[in-house]
Every structure is written in structure tokens, then in C-alpha cells.
Image (tube, rainbow, N blue to C red):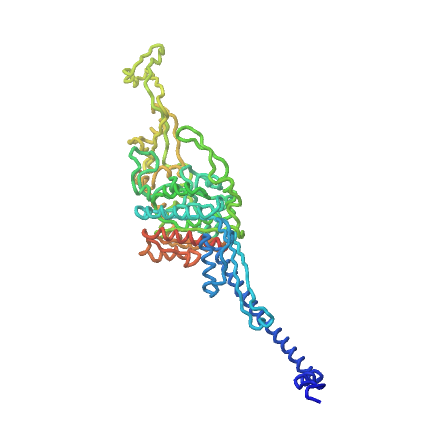
Amino acid sequence: MRRGEGTPAPSRRHVDNFVKDEEGSITLLSFFIFFMLLLMGGIGLDTMRQEMSRASLQATLDRAVLAGATAIDEETARNVVEDYFAKSGQSEYLEDEQEGDIDIRLNSSRVTARASRSLDTYLMKLAGVDTLDSQGTSTAEVTIPKLEVAVVLDVSGSMMGDRIDALRPAAKEFVSSILDSTEPGDAVISVIPFSWGVTPSDSMFEALNVTQTHNYSTCIKFSDSDFTSVAVDPNSALPQQIYTSREGLTFGNLISTPLTSFDDRYYRSCYTDEYFRIMPYATDKSKLHAKIDSLKAGGSTSGDEGIKWAAALMDTAFVPVVSELQQEKQEVRDDGTIHTYTEVDPTLTNLPASYTESDTLKVIVMMGDGANDNSYFFSENSYRGSNSDLFKVTYQEQDFAYAYDIYDPSRQWHGSYYEQYCYLNWLECVYEPRGEQSSAYYLRRPSDSRMLNITDGGSVSWYEFNNFDDNMNGFVSSERLSWEEAWGLMSVRFYGNKTGNWGPWNNYIGNSVNKSTKDARMANICEATKSNGVVIYTIAFEMGSQQSAAERIRQCASSTAHHYNATNVNIGSAFSAIAANVKQLRLTQ
């Protein structure tokens, strides 16, 4: 039999034998199990790598959009997102911005970003999977709180000239920056000028419970304890400040000399000019600019009162006052027309907001250019109340009409020629009133009761004065003014010079609130204000040589980072930095 006929070939025989051999099944099964384990391990390894990649992308996305949502505009927001990915080494995975991804509004912002990455597999290639994709999307949305801002500006005499000229545009730019980045009505700005004191507006004064003793000014006298809390309670009785001056001639029309004395303006205890008054809760940029443009300098420094009033305007105790300020009022203009107005926009609500409301940010910006200085007052019960030494005599100019015989009234003589005979006992002269009534002021000299006519000059005895109704032609009335009314018409130096009595001067000078007291008051009110969550920024303006005073202003700030030293050159930069900081702070609240 030939080879190959009827018998299997060797290779086939070997295969058949291997198949029939039961020991070979174990090797095959082991190989299969090993392959499956390798494949499953590869899947786990690659999917773990995919999850790590996805988590890294998502974490970067989350951080990037949160930071981007605090940007001031859409371009900046995208740049912030890209910068986060660049610094994490993942720029290539950040996807292009899509329409609507970034929306920066005046009172809210929304930022969305996407990222994706294709990851080469290691062992999943054995299963035909060459790559795995990682991707993520993140969105951050910020609602910006409303703003209550008080701008406290030093307008003391040292601000005259270049300083106040530099302040005006800087403060106006700050106002514009805040209002232009805020929805209408979402920011209110109060302007509080201060020098030797602070002057509330007429409407604010009327809304408070002030024990009023004169009509010359609206200033209120605070005690030390008033600076340990922020509120000015409209339900509590508040003492009115006496209005007078240490120096100068007079505040009224007591003499014919015009009021031109610098001392008279500088040493007032309260300033009544419109530009010194508080402008509360304003939302109109043009009106705020006009207010700042109108500021003039005079007097000395009471930074404690500036902060006190700023804090009061942010405390909820002022809610009833705001309601009064939102009521319609009328004024007669020079042309005779009646103007109806409200001091605060009546559409504003929840003002001032509670300190605990997260949707409102309260900010004070205080600018000072010098140390606190002494202020002067009368002691509590001296030169107060009724029966001052100043009298107001009202009279009316008279024209001679005719004279008649008292024994025969039918005998009459007309014409100004006969007025010369009015001294005759039997002749009665008749006069007719002419024009408006006029007033003359007489100041009693305590040493001899001589009545000094300080309007027209001269003097009369106490007896003559008290018989004006009989011997003064055109006499209408005589009124003895209260001391509060008298000090509104003359300074204490004027009184001393005229009467020789320097008692009021000594009392006024001897009852000052000194610098150290004001410093302590300012420290107290600043701490009380900050403890309620109000953010305080401060600017020490041109105070390079007044390090201790500048330090007291810095201590009022919320932190060292909230304080700025400024000069005429960079005062605008200081206000701009604060405005940017305030906007950033709103976004991160």
C-alpha cells in the first residue's frame, strides 16, 4: 500500500490528535479568560482616564464661569474664562463661544462655557474603540444687589481753591460710574457735605422730631452717646442747634454794611446755604452733578458728623423720613408759578433696606482733607430762651397829610410846609402811611440799659424806647426776641463789641467740642456703622503732612485696602478705583 492512500497525512493527524486530546481544552479556555480579563481591565483603565479628564474639564469650567460672571462686560468675561483654561493647560479643549453664552446686564450676569476632549484609548483598541470623548458644560449666574451709597465730602475752608476744583470732577465721575452701571432705581446716592457740621435739607428737618427754637437753620446738636449707634430716630426729640457765629459782624440786616466778612462765613455753627445741605437718596445723575458743582468751601472740620449722617440715612429708623421725603410739596418760583416736586423719587421702595437683606449693598465713601477741629456752643442753659437783649421795632414810613387845631378841628392846614409847627401843643398833625413796613433792631446794653440802634445808628434811653408808641412817628410794634432768635442775627463778637458785655463770648468759646472728642466720636460711629455690614471707603486728600489725621480717616475704612491717599493730581483715580471696587463687590456678594 502506497503512502498517503488510506492513511491521514501527518499534519492532519496532528491536528486531529490535538482536537481529540482533552488536555488542549484547558489551554484554550485559559487564553480566552486572560483575553477577557485584559479587555475588561482595559475598559476600566480607559474609562477611568476618561472620567478624570471629564472631571478636570468640569472643574476648570466651573471656576472659569464663576470668575467670568463677575466681569464688568462680555468681552472681559470671555477673556477670564479663556485665561482659566490657559493657566490649567487646557486651552485646546475650550470650545468656541456660542451666541447667548455670555450675558452681562446692569443688575445680573450669566456666563456659559463648554469644553471637550478626545482621549486615545490604551487597551480598548482591542475591542475596536480607538478614542473616548470627555465634555462638559457649566453656567454661572449672578444677581447684582441694589446699592445705597452715601458720598461724604469735606467742604471745610481748607478745601478752597485747587482742592475743591479737583474734587468736583472726580466726585461727578464716581456718580456717573455707579449710575451708568446700574439699572434705573437700583442705586441711590446721597451727597453729604460737611464742615463744622452737617445741614439736613428742609424736608428732612421737618420730618424729624426736632425741638425747634428758631427758623434760621436746620442743624441738629448731637451728644457723645449719639455716636455709639447709627440711627437718627425720628420719633425721639432732637435738640436744634443754635445758629450763630463766633466772629464777624452779623447774619441779618442789622446794619447797613453788607455781609462780606470772611470770618462771618468761616465761623458759623451751621451753614444754611443750599450747597451745604444734604441731598438724600438721589437717582438723577444730572441733579447729582449739579449738587457737586455747587459745592463751596467754608468753616472747619467735623468728620464725625459727616459719618453720623451717612449712617443715619442707611438705617431703617429713617424709613418714616423717606416716606415724608416722597410726599409732594409745592414751592412758589420767582416768576410766581407754583412748582410741585418730591425730594425723593416716590417709586423707590424698601428704602433704606434692612441690613440683613442680601440684595442690597450699603456703601459710604468719605473724603476728608484735614483733622477734626473745635466747634463752639453755648452751655445748656446760658443765653437761651426768652428775653434776650435784642429788640425788633416795626414801623412804617409816614407822609405828612395835614394839621388841625385840637380845639377847632375844622381849622386845618394842608401841605408839607405846616409840618414844622407840629411841635405846638394845640396842633395835631395827621400822617398817612407810605410803602411797606420796616424794622429796626435795638440792642440793650446791660450795664446801663441804653438801647443801641444797630440798624440806623444812635441810641435812646430805656425810658424813651418803652414810649415809642407815643413819641415815634409810624410806630407799629416792639418785640423782644429770644436768645435763639437773637443769635441768628448777630455773632457773639458783634454783641460783645457793641455792648461791652463779653459774657456770651466767654461762654460760647468755653463750651467747645474739642478735636479729641470729635476723633473719639468718629471712631465710635465708624465702628457702629461697619458692625452693621456697611462698607466704608475713605480718602485722605492732600494730607501728606497730617499723618495722624490721615490715620484716623484710614481707621474708619472697612480695611486698609478700602483706604486711599490722594492729591490734586490723582483724586480722580482714587474715586475711580472705589467705583470699580464697588461694582466688583456687588458682583461678588
* Residue farthest bottom in this picture: 1
* Residue farthest front in this picture: 1
**Quadrant housing residue 339:** top left
Count of number-bearing discs: 0
Taking 260 as reference, is 137 above or below it? below
Say which of 309 and 150 sits in front.
Answer: 150
Say which of 127 and 522 sits in front.
Answer: 127
**Quadrant housing residue 505:** top left
Taking 557 as reference, is 50 above or below it? below
Q: Position of residue 504 (x, y in %)?
A: 35, 43
Q: Position of residue 293 (x, y in %)?
A: 36, 42
Q: Position of residue 235 (x, y in %)?
A: 52, 44
Residue at image coords 35%, 57%: 548
Q: Position of residue 369 (x, y in %)?
A: 35, 51
Taking 374 as reference, is 5 above or below it? below
Do we see residue 464 in this rendering? Answer: yes
Q: Quadrant of the N terminus?
A: bottom right
Say which of 113 and 563 sits in front.
Answer: 113
Say which of 55 and 389 sits in front.
Answer: 55
Do we see residue 503 in this rendering? Answer: no
